[in-house]
Image (cartoon, grey):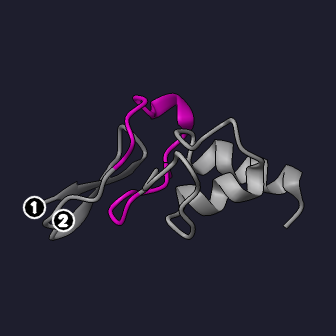
Amino acid sequence: MPEDLAGRVLRRLLPWAPTDLAPWPALLCANGRVDLPGQHGVRGPTGLAVGAPLDEWDGTVLRQVANPPTGYEWDRDAGRWRPHW
């Protein structure tokens, strides 16, 4: 994968990923594919990518909850699916 593409994917889907690394190693690390020195478990086994527009992201590293939603309902006002448990 070209470095510029890896960098764009990284900034869009995993904005909390390390910025002091080359984009491709940082992308692998943020997805839990490799451990890099000083970056141990940036993502971890329960980390998620930011799928919503970044202006809706509150800056926290998204984590999968222990109990996944039982279903989703369409939020017409927000224009997206909302989970329910």
For the point 15% across and 64% down, which residue is it?
A: 66
Furthest residue in direction front, as rendered = 37
Secondary structure category for the residue under label 2: loop
In the image, residue 38 lies at what x, y percent? Answer: 52, 45
The local crowd at label 1, few if under 14, some if 14 to 19, many if 20 or more residues have their Cα within 10 Å, is few
The residue that mark 2 highlights is 69
For the point 52% across and 39% down, which residue is it?
A: 16
The amino acid type, in three-letter code, at marker 1 is: Trp
Give whichever of 43, 51 is nearer the camera.
43
The local crowd at label 2, few if under 14, some if 14 to 19, many if 20 or more residues have their Cα within 10 Å, is few
Residue contact between numbered discs 1 and 2, judged by CB atoms under 8 Å: yes
In the image, residue 57 lies at what x, y percent? Answer: 45, 34
The amino acid type, in three-letter code, at marker 2 is: Pro
The residue that mark 1 highlights is 85
In the image, residue 52 lies at what x, y percent? Answer: 49, 46
Classify residue 41 as left or right of residue 82.
right
Task: Look at the image and tell me in which quarter the N terminus lies.
Answer: bottom right
Give whichever of 32, 50 is nearer the camera.
32
Circle count: 2
